[in-house]
């Protein structure tokens, strides 16, 4: 049974930090590209950060570059999103996603999301 379970969300003041975690199970984690997305009320889901299968490369949305860091520990089947200098505009539900293209087969799994609220 495939599972992605996010944790670490909460309420934080502007300028603060949070670290999100996503624990994966039920699939071969190290063969999947991992991504963090977010979705604010009334808005489309937005790609925030991507990390390669071996963690060797990362990519970020312009809105979070320099403030957020994605990382992964394949031995623990976990991906993280360190979020610093948080702004009210970062308020969203954050989702982790596992994505793999294997030949002609596409696999994509989603977690249930974790709420991040940035407010004073």
Image (tube, grey):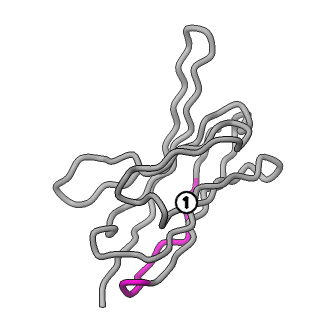
Q: Which residue is drawn at 46% across and 84% down?
A: 16
In depth, the one of 46 and 97 nearer the eye is 46
Left or right? Give the position of 50 relative to 41. right
- State the residue lying farthest toward the left: 42
Residue at screen point 41% across, 60% down: 64
- Tell me: 51 left or right of 119: right
Q: Splitting the image into 4 quarters, where does residue 11 fall?
A: bottom left
Residue for point 64% across, 53% down: 79
Q: In which quarter of the image is the N terminus?
A: top right
Magenta stretch containing residue 82, yes or no? no
Residue plotted at (59% across, 26% down): 100
Question: What span is in magenta?
Answer: 5-15
Residue 40 % position (x, y)? 26, 60
Q: x%, y% of residue 27? A: 70, 35
Look at the numbered disc 1 and give the secondary structure of its residue. strand
Residue 77 x/y as whole percent: 73, 49
Local crowd size for mark 1, using a 10 Å CA cut-off: few (<14), some (14–19), many (≥20): many
Check the picture and name the quadrant holding the C terminus: bottom left
Residue linked to disc 1: 6
């Amino acid at each position: 049974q495939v599972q992605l379970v996010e944790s670490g969300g909460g309420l934080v003041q502007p300028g603060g930090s949070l670290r999100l975690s996503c624990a994966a199970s039920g699939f071969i984690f190290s063969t999947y590209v991992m991504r963090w997305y977010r979705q604010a009320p009334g808005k489309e889901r937005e790609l925030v950060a991507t990390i390669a299968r071996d963690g060797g490369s990362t990519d970020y949305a312009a809105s979070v570059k320099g403030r957020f860091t994605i990382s992964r520990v394949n031995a623990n089947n976990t991906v993280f999103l360190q979020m610093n200098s948080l702004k009210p505009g970062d308020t969203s539900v954050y989702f982790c996603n596992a994505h793999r293209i294997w030949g002609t087969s596409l696999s994509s799994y989603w977690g249930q999301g974790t709420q991040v609220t940035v407010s004073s």
